[in-house]
Amino acid sequence: MSEPFADGWAAAWNAHDVDVVVAWYADAGTHRMASGNTYRGADDVRAMVERTLAGYPDLTFEVRGAFTGADGRHFAIEYTMRGHQQAAIGDRPGTGRAIEVDGVLVVTTDTDGRVRACVDYLDHLTIRRQLGLAD
């Protein structure tokens, strides 16, 4: 079943529209990677999005499922991320190799419907293995 928030999220990322992705977040919104990094506010989120898109110029997201809480302010997006890492991201050099990894976003929005807090459950070990950087 399609959910408008999930479709809009994927469309913004798939269009590589940094401004639309950043606008999805409240001014003080956070995006926390379950593996550790937390991005706070528009500047941090913008840097994360730009770095991700520079590293994966062909990045796409496919929504596999979306679930909304009864209050309409909590939701989850189950996705598959695909792309070829062409440039370094953190300590991962650009290898040109493809990745395909599943993840889940768990999101709480503010009263305006913008992301107040997001936790991104993405398997970074699988990404490293697919890039040839881990066994």
Image (cartoon, helix red, strand yellow):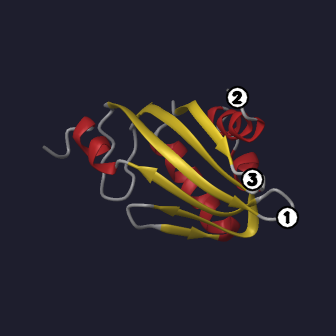
Q: Nearer the viewer, residue 2 or 33?
A: 2
Quarter of the image holding residue 108? bottom right
Residue type marked 1: Thr
Q: CA distance from mark 2 to mark 1?
A: 22 Å
**Closer to the N terminus: mark 2 or mark 1?**
2
Mark 3 against mark 1, which lies toward the viewer?
1
> In the shown orientation, is residue 99 left or right of residue 30?
left
Q: Position of residue 53 (x, y in %)?
A: 54, 43
Of the 4 image quadrants, the one containing the N terminus is top right
| C-alpha gap between disc 2 and disc 3 | 18 Å
> Residue placed farthest to the right in the image?
112
- At x 52%, y 36%, the residue is 79
Q: Mark 2 or mark 3: which comes first in sequence?
A: 2
User: Residue 47's x, y, as percent?
Assistant: 58, 60
Please say if 78 is above or below 115.
above
Asked whether the residues under the numbered discs 3 and 1 touch, taking CB atoms below 8 Å apart as contact, a structural biologist would say no
Percent x, y of residue 135: 12, 43
Q: Which residue is mark 1?
A: 111
> How far is the residue under mark 3 from the one under mark 1?
13 Å
**Judging from the image, what secondary structure is the residue with disc 3 in?**
loop
Report the residue at 59% width, 42% height from top: 77
Say which of 90 and 36 sits in front: 36
Q: Is residue 70 left or right of residue 96?
A: right
Residue 12: x percent and y percent? 70, 38
Identify which residue is drawn at 73% across, 34% down. Answer: 3
Relative side of 79 to 130, left or right: right
